[in-house]
Image (cartoon, rainbow, N blue to C red):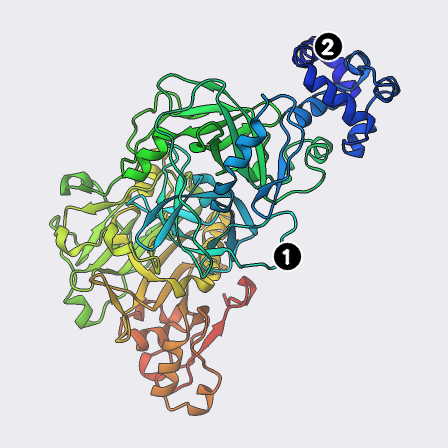
Amino acid sequence: MTDSAEKTRPADNVERRSTLETQVATNPKLLDTITARIAAGDYPKALLGALPDAALDNAHAARSPLESLVSTAPIAALEAIVKLTGRPPMLVRDDAVVMEPLPDFQPGTDLKIVSVQKWLPSVGRIEFLNADSSWGGTGSVVDKRGADLLVLTNRHVAKLVAQRAADGRGVFIRNWQGVRMGAEVDFREEADSRAGDRSRTATVTAIDYLADDLAADIALLRIAPGAYAPPAVFNMAAKDAGFNDLVALVGYPAFDPRNNAGAQAKYFHDIYNVKRFAPGFVTQVTSGASYLSHDCTSLGGNSGSPLINLDTGQLIGLHYAGEYLKANSAVSITTIKKVLSGAFTTVQVPGGVPGREGVAERRRDESHDAAHFTGREGFATAFLKKGTVATPWPGLNAALDATLALPSDTPAERGELRYTHFGVKYSATDKVPLMTAVNIDGGRSKRIKRGDDQWFFDGRIPRAIQLDAANFADPEIDRGHMVRREDPNWGTAEEAEQANADTFHYVNAAAQHARLNQSQHLWQGLENYILDSSRTGGFRASVFTGPVIGPDDPVIDGARVPLEYWKLVATLDESKQHLRATAYLLSQGQMIRDLLERRSRVEALEGITLGAYRTFQIAIADLAEATGYDFSAYLAADPLRRTDESVAGAAQAEPRFIAIENLSSIVL
């Protein structure tokens, strides 16, 4: 804190100085240590430079510098001296603590520290793969499951690279490039570790548990140890911590930009991201709660650090939060053991949501009966230009039309499951939405924040033909909205909320293979472009989307997993009088390759390789030929149309497509 800041809060600073003076005056050993370390220059240079000359002179003369410190030193420097001396974050080298003076602890504390050093190899740094951050926190080995080990860390650490699944497990998510992220645990990473040393690094093979946001801040990572000796499993304390218990925090404090940079440098000598051992005491235990407070020195990288009882050598808590230089919070051992036993309970923690104790930890799938959908009008074909420009449903080919699930509410459009501003045609045999259609009104759109996802079954068709959470249990399978959540959210606030909720029905979800998302950002960028452009220009759009049903589509857990997707966007043209329609394909190139082969364009095949997913703009006539669908209502409105607009004419020509490298590549 600067001198000017001190002048603005004199009462607060008087209290802070009084507290520190009492703390030092009642502990002669701490005072002697401060004096000796100042005289020896044993504090960081930045800290010594902040001390008044009188304090330095007194220290060199072997007199107490306390009076001059309390009266003249900046309060931040004074707090730093006491904290650094009384609660040192000691380095770990070769699985042993590098001891520093412990004047604020009872004699024999050093021996207790030595006795718990056996647990140091069981604490590791949580490192990330394919992520923006190289690492995110600390973890410790708490259980053995067969040949695997479970590593305990915080939910907020794991959520940097993973998301919670419906069954409470965690699933690694993808980065902005569409590559799935991952994690490892480095059980060394000490101050003198060799760069690139992976001799004690284990890969996280699964996330067995990722707590809900209303539950205790816990995650359990599964690892398969390598060739090195596996880390020991921590012994668990039999009961929760008590007030003033002697404890220690083991972890990887990182430079935290939220805190004062100079103060951090004073504490940690500008050495961050390596294993440290910080002793302290339990400062608060709240009756009936699942957390405790402690005063061990910590920074952001300590998230997930084990809190060890130095008297028993047992795990007593899991550090998850703290207020810099003041107090820290940890999950209690009772809660940790409940999670390990499978009793995943929801608890209230500091800063949680008051009155939400006991809220269910996860939202399970539920069902809506047919009556729930009363009044849903579905997709409007008379939507553009006040209904004068029609956008009819494209026709499915006969084979797929025969598989349609037929809703019990007998819609006018065959097979349409009607929702708010959109409709879905669903295959009863392939368990996949064959086609969706959504009306977008850019001038009346509403932004709705995404909440806790809860998915529903539609009671208008048999439950047995619908997907559920089990179909998305495989980490290589994603649950993809066919009608995007945002697209139908327009109209009154009530309409928009209802449309948003309607998109979370399983008939609107396709099982998508992981590879599809490798270039998903372009496909999503296309949809954002359509939606944002309509919002800006105030015009309307009708969007049809569906999978390309192909013979090579895998079937996983009873559900077809399409490898390609198409989209057709219908709007008004620049004159706002006539129809404009464009078609797109998310593909590795299979459809284009097949069209070239079918039309004997062998020379062009040399440029087609089945690599990463890409987004293409494709002529609607070519899309019609490849799928067997009836897009005749849109052929003449396609800017990629030929002189002969018919599908038969297209069959005699080379396929027309454009690889979209950016949105400016789109031909409108």
Provide the residue designation for mark 1.
194
Q: Is residue 49 above or below residue 30?
A: below
Considering depth in this image, is 506 or 76 the residue closer to the camera? Answer: 76
Q: Is residue 642 above or below residue 227?
A: below
Circle 2 SS class:
helix
Provide the residue designation for mark 2.
10
Residue 36's disc number: none
> In which quadrant of the rendered view does residue 490 lie?
top left
Label 1 sits on what residue type? Answer: Arg
- Does residue 440 appear anywhere in the picture? yes
Total numbered labels placed on residues in the image: 2
In-image side of 617 versus 621 (left or right): right
Circle 1 SS class:
loop
Q: Position of residue 279 (x, y in %)?
A: 57, 29
Label 2 sits on what residue type? Answer: Pro
How many residues crowd mark 1 within 10 Å: few (<14), some (14–19), many (20+)? few
Task: State how far apart marks 1 and 2 are (Cα).
Answer: 48 Å
In-image side of 145 versus 174 (left or right): left
Identified at 45% across, 43% down, the residue is 140
> In which quadrant of the rendered view does residue 543 lie?
bottom left
Considering depth in this image, is 415 or 106 the residue closer to the camera? Answer: 106
Identified at 48% across, 61% down, the residue is 522
Identified at 67% across, 29% down, the residue is 101
> In which quadrant of the rendered view does residue 256 lie?
top right
Q: Is residue 198 above or below residue 44?
A: below
Considering depth in this image, is 554 or 474 the residue closer to the camera? Answer: 474
Give the mark nearer the N terminus: 1 vs 2.
2
Viewport quadrant of the N terminus: top right
How many residues crowd mark 2 within 10 Å: few (<14), some (14–19), many (20+)? few
- Does residue 175 appear anywhere in the picture? no
Q: Position of residue 341 (x, y in %)?
A: 28, 38
Q: Position of residue 312 (x, y in %)?
A: 44, 29
